[in-house]
Image (cartoon, coloured by chain):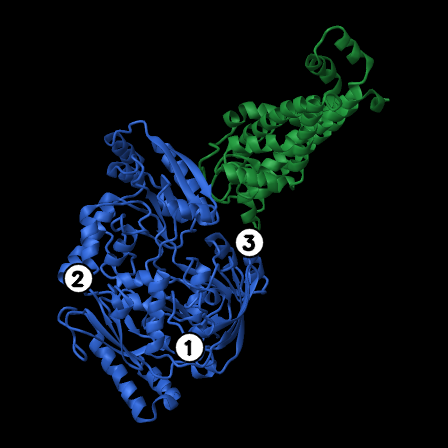
Chain colours: A green, B blue
């Protein structure tokens, strides 16, 4: 828990001040190309002569922004749709139809391999930070939807929901005010792991050239540029951003796991 | 003008070439013609002052197998796509048109290079023809095909093959058709059959570069029409479908296996002279440059195509691998596209030229290999001069010009490039940093190859950094005409440069005899290209190929392909 919390805190801090504390400009050559790690360039320089350490410090602003915003959008849309789909799964014919339609749409989107689908979406709309965010958000909606729907199906038949409706609440109000707060825990736990996964997916998209444009300081893009140098012996160009990426994703995963235990009293026992 | 130097083309070497080759032909005819072709070949070799025109007799007896890795699968082996792989295959299977550039010894041992710097047509010799004549007005050209040239199928090249080839070109309206237009051939009937081995070209206008155009036409034949017709149908009279993945040529090799995206196998045309020492070529398609590098590094390949300079630098340390280099004709450039209002301003383009980090690109992208480009005409071409290109990295001057152009606070620039070309991606990063520093706020726009190519041709980009230009014809007029001529008629003018004087000069040069006046025009074209800056020239990286150490006798031609037919083991 502490490891995850510390790494996430550092990432958040770097997202705010990373480019400001970087010792060198993050998008301009500052020295000879492919300089090995040394006292001046702690992580060495890349093929263009840019300081890798400075770029690693600046990377969370891009990676975390993409991951947080896309996950937040997916969370908001997925939870809302999950509540509607779950709450109205048994009701009037029209309500059942829309509930079913939402689930079938989710089935269709989830039928495609995730990365290929992301690649297609970004390829179609063009590589940019905004489009990557949109694509990742779109991809993650079904996961939040299913988790929330499952929880709503359990909660909606409880007596406090019936009581709320009997007290004069509309069904929609009952769904969002009374059912949603009691069904949101699984989605909240998933939120943390999805951020880690989104960072990984962003890096993957950049690695295949469909992510943010160069020379944006983004971990996947740095690994892509550096990977070409690994073959010629310049290991630091890809290894340093690769390690940072691995630690970050692991931290979000560990944090999410601990959050699940924290929110689930039975697990805590 | 047979046998004498033409007054209109004072530098023409036609007389010398014609006389020597006429002697060889008539001597051959008197002694049995085709049956004595080995003797003729030997005589030809003896007559040739330069060993670059021959393959040693003992090496011609060899049956080597050669393994190569292409970067991509050729989309077709017909003239429907421009890729290095397609051009390589066409050069191997069709061998080019009537003429060829004369190979002479290059700067590096074991490397022969096309004689591009020779004035006029002096660097051009016959390939399939042993004699040729131009009329006094240079509108009528007669070519005498050397008897005994046979395709892999065993059919002899005759005038009928040539007429079928050109008729097909006019039907296909592809690259050979482009060359027809550049030669001022208007219709198939402009090519007249005189006899079995003689054809006459009737040009609508005089062409000073027709021999050079013939030296570099690797696209669209000449076809073995007898073989190609076997695969024609009523619905496909020009055998387009079959020729997309098969060959019917007179070149040194023949395709025997073609699995798109995976592998190809070529075998020697046993009728080709001089006989290539390599009998069998195995080509694997390996898209990833790092993998191609790894394969040659561990000895699994003889040749890895299209490796970036960074990989070549690493491979140079391997004692089993050699990097073959020659000065070449590449023109990597930054192209401000004048369809954009800002890019249309000359002062803006000049500011960009002063802001460009030439030395840094040469150092970091090309590892100090290659040479800075300082003219629209490559340095190895005739009449090249660097005296007009004054630009070097000078941010203060760039800022001053931006202010004069009405952009004291700079402007936003979108710089596009093909993201599959690593060196262009690397150069773009350096250009962005340099431009940002003078107020040209640059956003990089990496695009997939097909998307980039389409938008470039449609002139939809704001600015591009590109390396897909290497003029095949050693002539400034041709280079200016084909890449930067009137944009309404020149599809290759992807930057929409439209300068009346430039247009007039390059158009006139395409139909003006060689001589002092044309040389003046040549220099003026170079001057205008520097003043108006339609392209910001970067670095000519040179021809560079990675092969196993044991191979030698490399030949560089302006198509920048590795011509396997010359190679043998040292």
Residue tagged 3: B290
User: Where is residue B476 shown, x and y percent of the image?
Assistant: 25, 57
Q: Is residue B471 visible?
A: yes
| Name of the residue lying farthest toward the top | A167
Q: Work out whether disc 1 and disc 3 sit on a shared chain.
A: yes
Between the residue at mark 1 and the residue at mark 3, the CA separation in whole angstroms equals: 43 Å
Whether residue B489 sits left or right of residue B293 in the image: it is: left
- When the figure is inspected, residue A251 is found, relative to residue B228, above or below; the finding is above
Between the residue at mark 3 and the residue at mark 2, the CA separation in whole angstroms equals: 48 Å
| Name of the residue lying farthest toward the right | A269
Query: Do the residues bearing badges 3 and 2 touch, measured as CB atoms within 8 Å?
Result: no
Q: Nearer the viewer, residue B39 or B549?
A: B39
Which mark's residue is nearer the viewer, 3 or 2?
2
Mark seen at residue B73: none
Query: Do the residues bearing badges 1 and 2 touch, measured as CB atoms within 8 Å?
Result: no
- Crowd class of label 1 (few under 14; some 14 to 19; many from 20; radius 10 Å): some
Residue tagged 2: B512
Q: Nearer the viewer, residue B311 or A261?
A: A261
Mark 3 or mark 2, which has the lower sequence index? 3
- When the figure is inspected, residue A163 is found, relative to residue A153, above or below; the finding is above
Between the residue at mark 1 and the residue at mark 2, the CA separation in whole angstroms equals: 38 Å
User: Under tag 1, what secondary structure?
Assistant: helix
Q: Which residue sits at x=43%, y=58%? A: B81
- When the figure is inspected, residue B377 is found, relative to residue A242, above or below; the finding is below
User: Under tag 3, what secondary structure?
Assistant: helix
- Crowd class of label 3 (few under 14; some 14 to 19; many from 20; radius 10 Å): some
Q: Which residue sits at x=77%, y=23%? A: A153
Residue tagged 1: B226
């Amino acid at each position: 828990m502490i490891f995850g919390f510390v790494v996430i805190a550092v990432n958040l801090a770097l997202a705010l001040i990373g480019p400001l504390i970087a010792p060198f400009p993050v998008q301009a050559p500052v020295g000879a190309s492919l300089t090995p790690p040394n006292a001046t360039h702690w992580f060495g320089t890349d093929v263009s002569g840019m300081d890798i350490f400075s770029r690693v410090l600046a990377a969370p602003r891009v990676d975390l922004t993409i991951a947080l915003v896309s996950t937040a959008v997916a969370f908001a849309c997925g939870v809302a749709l999950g509540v509607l789909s779950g709450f109205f799964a048994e009701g009037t014919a029209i309500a059942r139809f829309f509930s079913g339609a939402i689930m079938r749409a989710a089935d269709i989107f989830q039928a495609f391999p995730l990365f290929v689908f992301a690649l297609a979406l970004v390829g179609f709309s063009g590589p940019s930070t905004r489009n990557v965010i949109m694509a990742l958000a779109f991809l993650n909606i079904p996961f939040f939807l299913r988790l929330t729907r499952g929880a709503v199906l359990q909660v909606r038949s409880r007596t406090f929901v019936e009581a709320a409706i009997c007290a004069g609440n509309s069904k929609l109000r009952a769904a969002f005010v009374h059912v949603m707060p009691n069904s949101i825990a699984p989605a909240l736990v998933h939120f943390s792991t999805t951020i880690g996964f989104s960072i990984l997916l962003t890096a993957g998209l950049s690695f295949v050239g469909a992510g943010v444009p160069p020379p944006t300081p983004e971990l996947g893009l740095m690994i892509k540029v550096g990977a070409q140098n690994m073959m010629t012996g310049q290991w630091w160009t890809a290894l340093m951003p690769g390690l940072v990426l691995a630690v970050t994703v692991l931290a979000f995963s560990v944090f999410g796991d601990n959050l699940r235990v924290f929110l689930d009293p039975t697990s805590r026992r | 003008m047979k046998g004498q130097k033409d007054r209109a083309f004072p530098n023409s070497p036609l007389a010398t070439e014609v006389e020597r080759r006429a002697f060889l032909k008539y001597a051959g005819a008197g002694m049995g013609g085709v049956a004595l072709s080995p003797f003729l070949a030997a005589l030809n070799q003896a007559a040739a002052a330069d060993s670059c025109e021959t393959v040693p007799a003992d090496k011609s007896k060899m049956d080597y197998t050669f393994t190569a890795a292409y970067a991509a699968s050729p989309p077709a082996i017909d003239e429907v796509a421009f890729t290095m792989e397609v051009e390589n295959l066409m050069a191997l299977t069709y061998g080019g048109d009537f003429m060829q550039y004369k190979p002479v010894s290059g700067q590096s041992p074991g490397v022969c290079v096309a004689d591009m710097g020779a004035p006029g047509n002096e660097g051009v010799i016959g390939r399939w023809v042993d004699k040729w004549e131009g009329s006094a007005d240079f509108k009528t050209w007669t070519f005498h095909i050397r008897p005994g040239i046979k395709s892999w199928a065993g059919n002899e090249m005759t005038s009928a093959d040539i007429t079928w080839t050109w008729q097909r070109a006019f039907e296909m309206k592809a690259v050979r058709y482009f060359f027809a237009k550049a030669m001022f051939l208007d219709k198939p009937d402009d090519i007249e059959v005189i006899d079995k081995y003689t054809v006459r070209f009737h040009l609508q206008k005089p062409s000073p570069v027709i021999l050079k155009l013939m030296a570099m036409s690797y696209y669209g034949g000449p076809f073995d029409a007898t073989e190609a017709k076997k695969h024609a149908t009523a619905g496909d009279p020009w055998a387009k479908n079959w020729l997309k993945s098969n060959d019917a040529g007179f070149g040194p090799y023949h395709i025997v296996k073609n699995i798109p995206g995976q592998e190809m196998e070529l075998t020697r045309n046993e009728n080709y002279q001089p006989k290539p020492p390599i009998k069998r070529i195995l080509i694997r398609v390996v898209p990833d440059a790092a993998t191609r590098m790894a394969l040659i590094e561990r000895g699994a390949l003889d040749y890895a195509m299209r490796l970036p300079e960074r990989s070549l630098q690493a491979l140079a340390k391997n004692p089993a691998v050699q990097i073959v280099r020659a000065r070449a004709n590449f023109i990597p450039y930054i192209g401000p596209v004048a369809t954009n209002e800002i890019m249309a301003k000359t002062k803006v383009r000049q500011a960009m030229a002063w802001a460009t980090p030439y030395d840094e690109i040469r150092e970091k992208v090309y590892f100090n290999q290659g040479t800075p480009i300082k003219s629209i005409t490559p340095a190895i071409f005739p009449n090249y001069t660097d005296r007009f290109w004054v630009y070097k990295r000078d941010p203060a001057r760039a800022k001053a010009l931006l202010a004069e152009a009405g952009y004291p606070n700079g402007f936003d620039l979108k710089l596009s490039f093909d993201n599959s070309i690593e060196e262009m991606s690397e150069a773009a990063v350096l250009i962005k940093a340099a431009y940002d520093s003078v107020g040209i706020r640059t956003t990089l726009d990496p695009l997939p190859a097909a998307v980039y190519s389409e938008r470039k041709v449609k002139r939809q980009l704001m600015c591009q950094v590109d390396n897909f230009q290497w003029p095949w014809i050693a002539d400034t007029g041709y280079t200016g005409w084909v890449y930067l001529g009137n944009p309404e008629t020149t599809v290759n003018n992807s930057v929409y440069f439209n300068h009346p004087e430039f247009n007039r000069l390059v158009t006139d040069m395409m139909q003006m005899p060689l001589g002092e006046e044309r040389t003046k025009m040549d220099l003026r074209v170079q001057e205008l290209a520097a003043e108006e800056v339609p392209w910001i020239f970067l670095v000519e990286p040179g021809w560079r190929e990675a092969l196993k150490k044991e191979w030698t006798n490399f030949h560089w031609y302006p198509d920048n392909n590795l011509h396997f037919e010359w190679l043998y083991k040292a």
